[in-house]
Image (cartoon, rainbow, N blue to C red):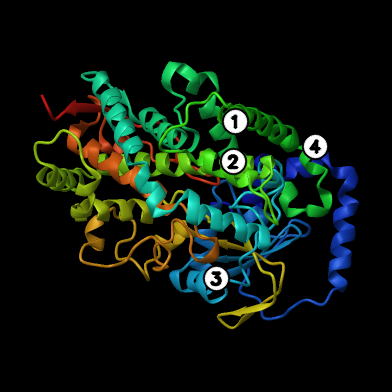
Amino acid sequence: MLEGTPMALLQWLKEGILPSLILASPFLVVILNFLLKGTSRKTMSNLPPSPLKLPIIGHLHQLGNMPHLSLYRLAEKLGPIIHLQLGEIPTVVVSSARMAKEVLKTHDLALSSRPEIFSAKHLFYNCTDVVFSPYGAYWRQIRKICILELLSAKRVQSYSFVRKEEVARLVHRVAESYPGNTNLTKMLGLYANDVLCHMAFGRDFSAGGDYDRLGFQKMLEEYQELLGGFSIGDFFPSMEFMHTLTGMKSRLQNTFRRFDQFFDEIIKEHLNPEKKKEDNIDLVDVLLERHSEATEMPLTMDNIKAIILDMFAAGTDTTFITLDWGMTELIMNPKVMERAQAEVRRVVGEKRFVLESDLPQLHYTKAVVKEIFRLHPPAPVLVPRESMEDITIDGYNIPAKTRFFVNAWAIGRDPESWENPETFKPERFMGKTIDFKGQDFELIPFGAGRRGCPAITFGMASVELALTQLLHSFDWELPPGIQNKNLDMTEVFGITMHRKSPLIVVAKPWFP
């Protein structure tokens, strides 16, 4: 981990943020001017503990290449709530269930806004989506639309036929590769994308090679990296021009253009009067209906595209990541795999396909999913919040306009909440009511409170059915010569957290 040592600092200077500052050296006077002004301001005392900081950059060098891990290590030394000065941005990081409850419940309203993130502003049509929109009347309106119309339990249930079709296609793809090796990571990515596109857009894009033709995988990877990277410009708002110097702005514009053209194509299809209307309208149909309504705050086409991007990128990515990490952990832990398979096969019996009505009986498999979320939350550090007023947390005074990070990855490994936290052990959830829906702060992969993810039911239906079907349909092993200890478990940090290497397996069909 990079800390405040000279050698670590040299490495960070070489690989991290300061190359951007060197490019901008003629403008360093701007930063110095900001700091000189800042010293004359009245500062609020009694802030949470903080490590030593450097001039100008503050604690930016403490983040390293894997911020969730660096912040976890800082919390081990300084406690579950710490204060960092990240460039110009005062920041609080919380890393325990107790502190997360303070942020996400006790002070939920005061912390319900979002900071302006440069990448989100450019990708999400000036932050008019659900995730990054600042707190206010517009955000309340679109969240209400999502909860009551797009992502309601009734709507999710109406798409059960889509999940059934796409799980069957996943099984077929995997079975075709036997007795050879299967790139399960790629198969799971296709499944997650097909489910989302089928429900949201009315069709999939893997058939006929559209997935590769449109470059979905590259688009998603670029999205994940651009939003998840700790960009220098976001920590020096007074120097927004740095995004141009670092190339960030051109990357954002290129990625935005590709998404925008894709969404224009989707909307054009839906507005075509010759388009056959299905009994089950898709999510874009629902949004376009709201666009045509005469209301005080009508949705513009850009608003609709921002919400579509939320669904497309976040909906695909979280399902894929959960399944990919989940199958990896099961293969790494054969006893857990054996117990989960035995439960699924006992409940499902001789049926070739798992029914959604079978899922409530799969108690151990549901515990497996919770354990996946504990160790591998899709977003390791939840989307940041920003305080709208001065607040007090755990006796510390925290001023308005402070950025808040909740380290969900660290909370899932907190020894105060979990026994043997590094061990993959679903049994820890058996006979307990703890869940991941925002009421139990030891397990918050989707956040909690007003800014908690509204799509939990939507995503979990796709995850649980696919995972249980894979357990039911195949016996799994690694390719010859590969052992569990050889699997690369390296994480790639972003707004969501992928595995670096694809999961290559042998999937032997259980049915003749």
Residue 457, image x, y percentages: 39, 52
10 Å crowding of disc 4: few (<14), some (14-19), many (20+) = some
- Give the distance between the C-alpha atoms of the residues marked 3 and 1, in whole angstroms: 43 Å
Q: Nearer the viewer, mark 3 or mark 1?
A: 1
- Give the distance between the C-alpha atoms of the residues marked 4 and 3, in whole angstroms: 35 Å
| Label 3 vs 1, first from the N-terminus | 3
Which residue is the site of mark 2?
288
Tag 1 secondary structure: helix
- Give the distance between the C-alpha atoms of the residues marked 4 and 1, in whole angstroms: 40 Å
Name the amino acid type tagged 1.
Leu
Residue 481, image x, y percentages: 24, 26
The quarter of the picture where residue 15 lies is top right
Name the amino acid type tagged 2.
Leu
Residue 425 in sight in this render: no
Give the left or right position of residue 34, taking residue 153 as reference.
Answer: right
Name the amino acid type tagged 3.
Val
Name the amino acid type tagged 4.
Leu
Which quadrant holds the C terminus? top left
Given contact means CB atoms under 8 Å apart, are the residues at marks 3 and 1 in contact?
Answer: no
Residue 245 — which label?
4
Determine whether 338 is above or below 49 in the image: above
Q: Nearer the viewer, mark 2 or mark 4?
A: 2
Q: Work out whether residue 480 or residue 477 is closer to the camera in this orientation and state it.
A: 477
